[in-house]
Image: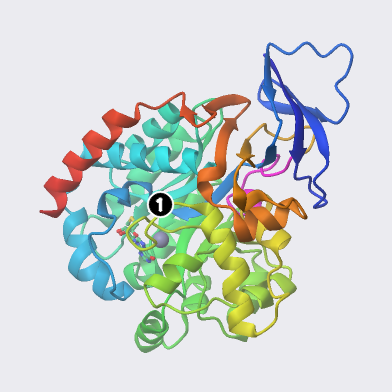
Amino acid sequence: MKTLIKNVYALLPDGTTPLTNIMIDRDKIASIGEVPEDFRAAKVIDGKDKFAVPGFVNAHTHASMTLFRSYADDMNLMDWLNNMIWPAEAKMQEEDIYWGAMLAAVEMIEGGTTTFADMYGPYMEKVAEATADAGLRAVLSRGIIGVAPDGDAKIEENVSLYKDFHGAADGRITVMFGPHAPYTCPPDFLKKVAKTAQSLGAEVHIHMAETKAEIEQITKAYGKRPFRYVEETGLFDGKGTLAAHCVHLDEEDIAIIKKHGIRVAHNPGSNMKLASGVAPVPRLLKEGVCVALGTDGASSNNNLDMLEEINLAAMLHKVSTLDPLAVPARTALKMGTEYGAKAVGLTGVGKLEAGCKADITLFDMNSAAWYPRNDLASLLVYSAHADSASTVLVDGKVLMEDKELLTLDKERIFYEAQKCAERLTK
Ligand SMILES: CSC[C@H]1O[C@@H](n2cnc3c(O)ncnc32)[C@H](O)[C@@H]1O
Ligand SMILES: [Zn+2]
């Protein structure tokens, strides 16, 4: 099926925003520019007053945690996890994981996100089901906490997730391994995860160096900081690693990140709300590290709004370095799109370019925030909000058109999610 997005402003990989046309053939962008004479589109989308950008890539989240939004605020990470989140998560059933992920899907599509990297579990197959139902693209991992007695069973669940869903939903779902964090996974356990993931050729998604408390705890327990601790287990020797947070880094940590080509998911909203700190993002970018953006879960953010993370990334590093060029608008946009796709292990995603996947968000510029139209990329990052997202395509399929969700029944999802949350949090 061929689709034409006609007369649209488009954010191209070189940062320009020409008025152009986007030709889509099945799941891919066929070309951008003049409409070829022989291009017969079955569907034409009017791009008048619309700004097309690559769909956002949320490089680190816990989708089903939407059920815990506004349930545990104004706490630090360890207090929040130990005293509020983990006790509530222990009650979660299959339906909670599914409806929580479906609520996340509504929010993500409505905000222009087309891909998300998710770490949660048990019942990650329900997140896969929600992804397939919504039409989104996802990189899923079974979050594995290795301190409980059933650690090995959790590794086996990640193996099953990989075998059952890597490449599923027409290739929209891929699977990584998800050892939760250095402080929840002892060394022999991490070695086992590393060996298992590497035997399958799977990548790894892990929380790293998020808080000062983590650095202190790991240093006290093992005599080394989290990055060297995990490096010595061999976890970073496999196909690739996506490391969420990376807030508290020293020179050796940065050297380890570079040596292993570790990709970083920066979560400015969550790091601010949990009072975790400010990740050294300008330095990492300068060192050539791939830095993407994530929301983290909706209980520590408290939303899944990637445009807000893009804005926060651009703003936070200016104020923390007193350098207005620390993260410029176009860099922040790349972190939320092109670098995001690379960070989560996807090629041919995250760019408006011929041959790339047709994962596209159209922003409606018919509001005051979009005037005057000096610089569209700047307007998107510094002035507009996610509710300007009006049309979203993944793999060339329209998931939202003129604000109408085409794959999801919003009323039902709100009802079921409310019911699940009441059981879990009351
Ligand atoms: C074992 S599944 C994933 C696990 O991670 C928890 N989580 C959510 N946000 C964070 C964060 O910022 N740092 C560490 N862990 C986090 C989530 O509640 C699940 O238990
Ligand atoms: Zn997280």
Q: Is residue 57 visible?
A: yes
Whether label 1 lies within 8 Å of ligand 1 gets the answer yes
Occupied quadrant, residue 347: top right
Residue 348 image offset from top left, x and y in percent: 71, 39
Camera-side residue of 305 and 205: 305
Residue at the spot of label 1? 119
**Count the marks: how many?**
1
Q: Residue at x 61, y 54 (%)?
A: 336
Q: Is residue 374 magenta?
A: no
Q: Residue at x 61, y 58 (%)?
A: 383
Q: Residue at x 34, y 40 (%)?
A: 103
The magenta-colored residue range is 341-352
Q: How is the image coloured?
A: rainbow
Question: Ligand 2 lies in which image quarter?
Answer: bottom left
Q: Residue at x 43, y 63 (%)?
A: 191
Residue 48 image offset from top left, x and y in percent: 71, 31
Quadrant holding the N terminus = top right
Q: Is residue 420 left or right of residue 387?
A: left
- Judge whether 39 appears above or below 180 on screen: above
Camera-side residue of 237 and 168: 168
Magenta span: predominant SS is loop
Q: Is residue 257 left or right of residue 166?
A: right
- Judge whether 184 appears above or below 422 on screen: below
Residue 132 image offset from top left, x and y in percent: 44, 29
Q: Is residue 342 magenta?
A: yes
Disc 1, SS? strand
